[in-house]
Image (spheres, grey):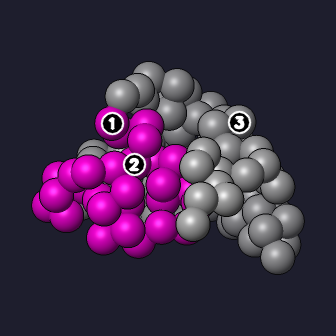
Amino acid sequence: MTPLVLSQWRRWSVASSSSSSSSGPVPGAAGGVAALGAVDGRARDVLLAVARGMSNQEAAASLGLTLATTKTYVHELLHRTGCTSRTQLVVLAYEAGLVVPGAPARGAGRT
């Protein structure tokens, strides 16, 4: 299902970038991917958790953060990349190579 979502999002990204001249970076375009390159530390950890499908509460628990701090990181990631949804953040993380399809998550297999 991920390839289908990626292809649909890419079509939306191309269509919206050609039909509008927004001042912020278009998700999936060089600006959004470049913004992810500057993400490090805890923001990167939160991004990876979101990209792996975790909710804010799950990400907070797995990273030892408060829910409010996790929400702040997600909000800042959305703002810095020009994304308008968590789904766009996930696509951007895949496009930037931060997450590899089919690769096990860190800590996978623990019970």
Task: Reply yes or no: does residue 35 show up in magenta.
Answer: no
Q: Which is the main secondary structure of the residues drawn in magenta?
A: helix
Q: How far separated are the C-alphas under marks 2 and 1?
A: 6 Å
**Residue of label 3:** 97
Residue at the spot x=85%, y=65% of the render?
3
Q: Which residue is mark 2?
A: 46
What segment carries the magenta color?
A: 42-70
- Decide if residue 8 is on the left or right side of residue 38: right
In the image, residue 5 sits, relative to residue 110, either above or below, namely: below
The residue at 60%/45% (across/down) is 106
Foreground pick, 65 / 108: 108
Give the residue at x 19% y 64%: 67
Give the distance between the C-alpha atoms of the residues marked 2 and 3, in whole angstroms. Answer: 16 Å
Alpha-carbon neighbours of circle 2 within 10 Å: few (<14), some, or many (≥20)? Answer: many
For marks 2 and 3, the one nearer the N-term is 2
Task: Name the amino acid type tagged 1.
Answer: Arg
Q: Specify the amino acid type for callout 3.
A: Gly
Q: Secondary structure at mark 1?
A: helix
* 11 to 65, vertically: above or below: below
Q: Quadrant of the N terminus?
A: bottom right
The residue tagged 1 is: 42
Return the residue nearer the eye: 77 or 71: 71
Q: Amino acid at mark 2?
A: Val
Instruction: State the SS at label 2.
Output: helix
Q: Is residue 74 left or right of residue 38?
A: left
Q: Secondary structure at mark 3?
A: loop
In the image, residue 65 lies at what x, y percent? 22, 52
